[in-house]
Amino acid sequence: MIIIGEKINGTIPNVKRAIEEKNEKFIGDLAIKQADAGADYIDVCAGTTPEIEVDTLKWLMEIVQNTVHKPLCIDSPNPKTIETVFKYAKQPGIINSVSEENDKCEVIYPLIKGTDWQVIALTCDNRGIPSDVQTRIDITKILVEKAGNYGITPDKIHIDPLVIAVCTDNQSLLKFIETTKTIKEMYPTIHITSGLSNISFGMPLRRIINQNFLTLAMYAGMDSAIMDPCNREMMATLLATQVLLGQDRHCRKFTNAYRKGKIGPKKE
Ligand code: THG
């Protein structure tokens, strides 16, 4: 599993405050905690008004890069913002994200052409998030085909099928699974990613729903997640699922995480 740590996001109230107060230590600590917990990439999202988004992202990127050696996942709905801050990244990471909305692909794909950068591609377009499987597949084909025009191969792409809250559509997970399986059949080397908390909006006991979503989605072929690696129950679920799916030889990752106190009882 590719773990993208989600905690440096200006839409989270205490992160928003740290950004306003220019609290470098708070942001740096979030980077360290996530890296220690097992994040492969550190997502940075300003979550601010467009006027100060570029400056905020640059500031976040600099702190993370001066604190940990993990690559970034640059998270902005605005491709122009990503284009502007891209040059401040010290090593290739992930762009979050492109989609079939407006000219996103045409701005982002040339930027990462010929590099080791990866990209998250959302299955939505100017009509919004599709409620059916077929439209998600159709959009995926276009996103992958356009990437190919820039020499960007499927192994560099993480498709995010944009899971809808299950209280809004009780077929939501089943559609996600069908989408995931079909895309993996079409492009065996592609990655499938998702946020883990969208599924449970509007529900009680969200953590239980999110954990079970992770297990079922991994079984269907999801191999990347935007998540809180400091959520110990979620990490235990992730590692246990890897064991059960034969993705953890000799159960080594699971037992090592347990020995180090990263899952199960805390060790000091
Ligand atoms: N897809 C893609 N990018 C995304 C999302 C997605 N970026 C933003 C978002 N969704 C993922 N990021 C977050 C960040 C924080 C939280 C949820 C999603 C959040 N955090 C709580 C906190 O940190 O306090 C609690 C986390 C927990 O305990 O699990 O709610 O879907 N491509």
Image: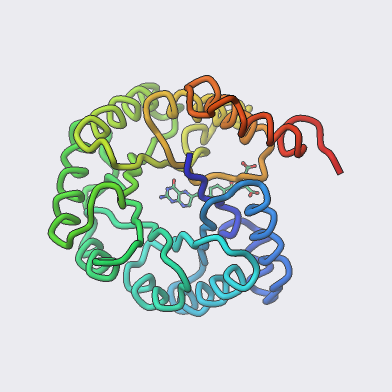
Tally of numbered discs: 0
Residue at image location 37% in from the left, 25% down from the top:
220
Query: Residue 267, position in %: x, y?
Result: 84, 39
Q: Is residue 31 left or right of residue 198?
A: right
Looking at the image, residue 228 lies above or below residue 8 = above
Using the rendered view, name the quadrant where residue 17 is placed: bottom right
Outermost residue on the front side: it is 250
Using the rendered view, name the quadrant where residue 190 is placed: top left
Residue 11 or residue 145, whichever sits in front: 145
Residue 127 or residue 237, whichever sits in front: 237
Residue at image location 39% in from the left, 35% down from the top:
164
Using the rendered view, name the quadrant where residue 101 is placed: bottom left
Screen quadrant of the C terminus: top right
Residue 55 or residue 110, whichever sits in front: 110
Residue 175 or residue 38, whichever sits in front: 38
Query: Residue 237, position in %: x, y?
Result: 60, 28
Q: Is residue 102 left or right of residue 86?
A: left
Query: Residue 31, position in %: x, y?
Result: 64, 60
Looking at the image, residue 62 lies above or below residue 140 = below
Residue at image location 41% in from the left, 65% down from the top:
92
Outermost residue on the right side: it is 268
Colour treatment of the image: rainbow
Query: Residue 82, position in %: x, y?
Result: 38, 70
